[in-house]
């Protein structure tokens, strides 16, 4: 319950510092830190400061740089380790706490966004499947400044194979299930993509393969997957795929998918991603979201013994390591919203166990997703002119990856959206 108390305290007590940090455009304030990771590929600055002006970073300096005078320092958020704001590239706004987003009280939505996302440093999230109108309504309230929350990109309603809803979705509310598209033709698939984009979607999610239980897997026809991908690209969006098994990964690559949203643990013939498959993924510039903690969560739910869990998750870790070693772009993501355990600590620990360095994990949270979404010119680094999307950590994640989840403050567009008050 300690975290819940902390979140509630933050919601109440955080108000004063949030007001301090609320920027009318042109408002300037300083954030100081024991260390600033300006980007994963640059050495950190010690005892540094960040000057925020309105929604952007105006300047970054160290103790030896002339610091602007007469500017207020934010006391609630200063004194930690500063990095660019994190992106969680795999979330869902399907819980009822996000329902009726257009009219639900702002405080309710903020508390739910806090618990799932902003208290863990996420300033941008990619919703990879939800009711698009509701998620776009949530995004609009955040962008209007009515609700404090992260920037939201969404894939809208995902596409499934005909009669191919995956077995693990069968517990979703029937009202939601009845709306899940299962196109039988390329025309139907293209129409669904157009509808999603007309509603405000930024991409498309394809379930290229779905488990039906008892080892049965339904597959989307390659024509339908290709048509949906081509329509998405024509509209400037990105295509994401749920792969299920290595064959599904290969199908995603062939269809022209940009991001595979999971590693795989359901292959009946083992879950090795062959060097040929990884080479094809690299050649087509496919990114991977590992979601390793999700496998622990699902295997525990299925009461799989711990030693077998280790073997299965170990296979997924090997896929991640081989893909990363081949130069593949890894995007951090946890599937929260589907997964009801929100704390990303275990994901950081598993990624490190797979062999990724803390700097590679920071890349997967910041510069890699910004580049993938063609936003490297506006966010992803602590650099003048970029968005003041910042995370303040209580410790250095390079010495302990668990510190990535130990968030003191989350700042989005120059405004504190989360302040931890218990330390
Ligand atoms: Zn998901």
Image (spheres, grey):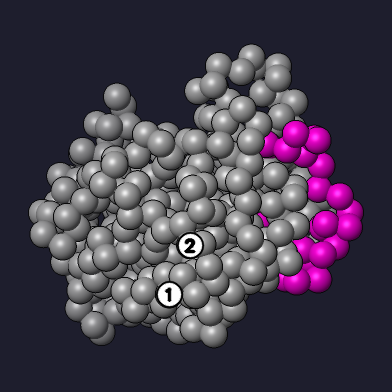
Q: Is residue 62 above or below residue 338?
A: below
Q: Is residue 282 above or below residue 345?
A: below
Residue ID for mark 1: 191
On screen, residue 79 versus residue 278, left or right, reads: left
Q: Residue at x 53, y 68 (%)?
A: 185
| Number of other residues with Cα within 10 Å of mark 1, as a class: few under 14, some 14 to 19, many 20 or more | some
On screen, residue 400 versus residue 58, left or right, reads: right
* Residues at circles 1 and 2 in contact by the CB criterion of under 8 Å: yes
Between residue 62 and residue 92, name the one nearer to us: 92
Mark 1 residue element: helix
Q: Is residue 287 magenta?
A: yes
Q: Which mark is residue 183?
A: 2
Q: CA distance from mark 1 to mark 2?
A: 9 Å
Counting residues from the N terminus, which is met first, the one under dot 1 or under dot 2? 2
Between residue 239 and residue 57, name the one nearer to us: 239
Q: Residue at x 25, y 61 (%)?
A: 134
Can residue 379 be seen here? no
**Image quarter for residue 44?**
bottom right
Q: Which mark is residue 386?
A: none
What range of the chain is rendered magenta?
265-288
Q: Is residue 380 magenta?
A: no
Mark 2 residue element: loop
Q: Quadrant of the image for the C terminus?
A: top left
On screen, residue 246 versus residue 361, left or right, reads: right
| Number of other residues with Cα within 10 Å of mark 2, as a class: few under 14, some 14 to 19, many 20 or more | many
């Amino acid at each position: 319950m300690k975290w819940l108390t902390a979140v509630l305290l933050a919601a109440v007590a955080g108000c004063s510092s949030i007001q301090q940090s609320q920027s009318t455009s042109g408002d300037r304030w300083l954030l100081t830190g024991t260390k600033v990771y300006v980007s994963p590929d640059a050495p950190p600055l010690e005892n540094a400061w960040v000057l925020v002006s309105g929604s952007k970073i105006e300047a970054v300096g160290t103790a030896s740089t002339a610091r602007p005078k007469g500017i207020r320092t934010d006391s609630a958020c200063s004194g930690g380790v500063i990095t660019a704001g994190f992106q969680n590239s795999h979330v869902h706004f399907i819980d009822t706490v996000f329902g009726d987003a257009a009219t639900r009280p702002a405080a309710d939505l903020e508390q739910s966004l806090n618990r799932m996302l902003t208290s863990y440093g996420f300033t941008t999230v990619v919703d990879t499947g939800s009711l698009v109108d509701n998620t776009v309504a949530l995004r609009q309230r955040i962008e209007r400044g009515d609700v404090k929350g992260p920037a939201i990109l969404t894939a809208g309603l995902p596409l499934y194979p005909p009669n191919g809803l995956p077995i693990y979705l069968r517990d979703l509310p029937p009202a939601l299930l009845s709306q899940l598209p299962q196109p039988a033709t390329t025309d139907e698939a293209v129409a669904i993509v157009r509808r999603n984009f007309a509603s405000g979607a930024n991409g498309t999610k394809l379930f290229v393969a779905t488990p039906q239980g008892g080892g049965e897997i339904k597959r989307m026809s390659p024509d339908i997957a290709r048509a949906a991908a081509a329509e998405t690209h024509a509209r400037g969006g990105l295509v994401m795929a749920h792969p299920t098994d290595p064959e599904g990964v290969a199908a995603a690559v062939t269809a022209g998918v940009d991001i595979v949203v999971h590693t795989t643990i359901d292959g009946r013939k083992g879950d090795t991603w062959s060097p040929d498959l990884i080479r094809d993924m690299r050649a087509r510039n496919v990114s991977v979201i590992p979601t390793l903690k999700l496998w622990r969560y699902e295997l525990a739910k299925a009461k799989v013994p711990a030693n077998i869990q280790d073997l299965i998750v170990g296979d997924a870790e090997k896929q991640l390591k081989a893909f990363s070693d081949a130069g593949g772009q890894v995007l951090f993501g946890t599937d929260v919203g589907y997964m009801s355990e929100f704390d990303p600590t275990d994901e950081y620990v598993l990624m490190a166990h797979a062999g990724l360095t803390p700097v590679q994990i920071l890349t997967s949270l910041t510069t890699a997703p910004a580049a993938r979404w063609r936003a490297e010119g506006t966010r992803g680094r602590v650099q003048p002119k970029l968005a003041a999307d910042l995370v303040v950590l209580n410790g250095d994640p390079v010495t302990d990856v668990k510190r990535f989840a130990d968030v003191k403050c989350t700042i989005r567009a120059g405004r504190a959206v989360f302040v931890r008050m218990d330390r």
